[in-house]
Image (cartoon, rainbow, N blue to C red):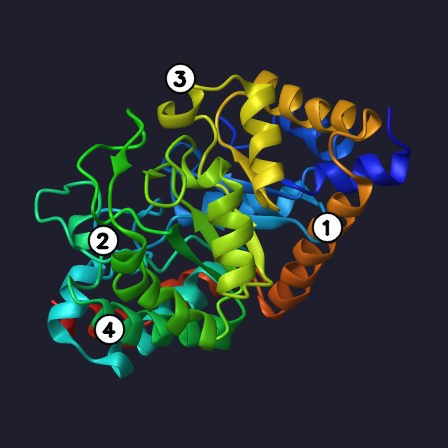
Amino acid sequence: MPAKDLRKKIGQLFLVGFEGRNISPWLKQLFHDYHVGGVVLFSRNVSEPGQAFEMLRSFKVPGLLVAIDHEGGRVVRLPAPVTRFPPAGQLGLVNSPEMVRRSAVCQARELSAIGINFNFAPVLDVRSNPVNRVIADRSFSADAQAVGRLAREYVRGSLEVGVAPCGKHFPGHGDTREDSHELLPRVDTSPATLEQRELVPYRMALAAGLPAIMTAHVVHEGLDPTLPATLSQPVVGKLLRERLGFQGVVVTDDLEMKAVADNWDVEDRTLLALKAGADLLMYCHTPEVQIRAIETVYRAVDGRIVKPEQIEQSFARIQALKTACRKVQPAHNRDELMEMLNRSEHKALAASLG
């Protein structure tokens, strides 16, 4: 068993989902015995924004990352009166970088008021396959430069408030047909096409200060014919870290999705993700699986399969992300929260975007 300080740092490498709308005994154990770095909110955790606000206040875990998918359109987890912005595809039709920045500011202010500091947006995928229904209107455009121009303003707007944006799904989910929630997609996009198309928005978002990137459960055969990007050292370690020079936090997509869960057991996918270069490992559903994954890393460190230095590096990146999130200011009470969520200028902006 690693020393207590190192066990705490290993726990910080995990983002967990949970059932219910309050702090359960399992979640208390994950906080206090396993020291997990953050939680991911889903619709199942939220009846209305005031309940989510009170629930998060009850956690009383300093420095916790509170993450959510809040893209707009069909990918939102929070009900009214949280402002419902149109999907990225509609913003792409409006094609106004300034309007995208303003929408990101509004969304981040509302998330901040609830106590959410980490948003899995913007989608940086290029809508290159017209039959791809998984991404579709979640992407700004079929044009890589347009995706990059709009996404970088989304990044800037979110950072202005202090909610950390996380671009996804690296190195691209736009050219797939299958849904990685159910199957493992494979694409044969050439490295040259990736460079000219999929990687363009990432380079532009990184230049705007994007602090986190989520990997795709997609096999890019031109980069690694065997493993999906999430588990692939050629994709994460070589392409993202070395070639693109990304020094921020690499987040896995949910490691309980069927694309990986049906093909690798918990131990294998946990260690492959770490060896690939991931910092934050996301397990969104099952407490027993979450604990099994954390304890897998304990054993791997004990056996020198994973070096303590790698844990320290990932921990430092995650702490830097948490420091940047300290600008987030939750509301002081429910009345203040409702005032923020019902701002007329937010509703008017969303309506003007279609």
Label count reads 4
Q: CA distance from mark 4 to mark 1?
A: 33 Å
**Considering the image in quadrants, where does the N terminus appear?**
top right
Secondary structure of the residue carrying numbered label 3: loop
How far apart marks 1 and 3 lie (CA) works out to 29 Å
Mark 3 near mark 4, Cβ–Cβ under 8 Å?
Answer: no
Q: Which residue type does callout 1 highlight?
A: Phe
Numbered disc in front, either 4 or 1: 4
User: Could you classify mark 2 by the number of other residues whose Cα lies within 10 Å: few (under 14), some (14-19), or many (20 or more)?
Assistant: many
Nearest to N terminus: mark 4 or mark 1? 4
Say what secondary structure mark 1 lies in. Answer: helix
According to the picture, the residue beneath numbered tag 3 turns out to be: 262
Precedes in sequence: disc 1 or disc 3: 3
Q: Which residue is mark 1?
A: 315
Q: CA distance from mark 3 to mark 4?
A: 35 Å
Residue under the point 51% across and 49% down? 236
Relative to residue 334, is residue 19 depicted above or below? above
**Residue 49: image location, x then y, percent:** 41, 49
The percent coordinates of residue 233 (x first, y second) are 53, 42
Residue 145 image label = 4
Viewer-nearest of discs 3 and 2: 3
Distance from the alpha carbon under mark 2 to that under mark 1 = 31 Å
Q: Which mark is residue 138?
A: 2
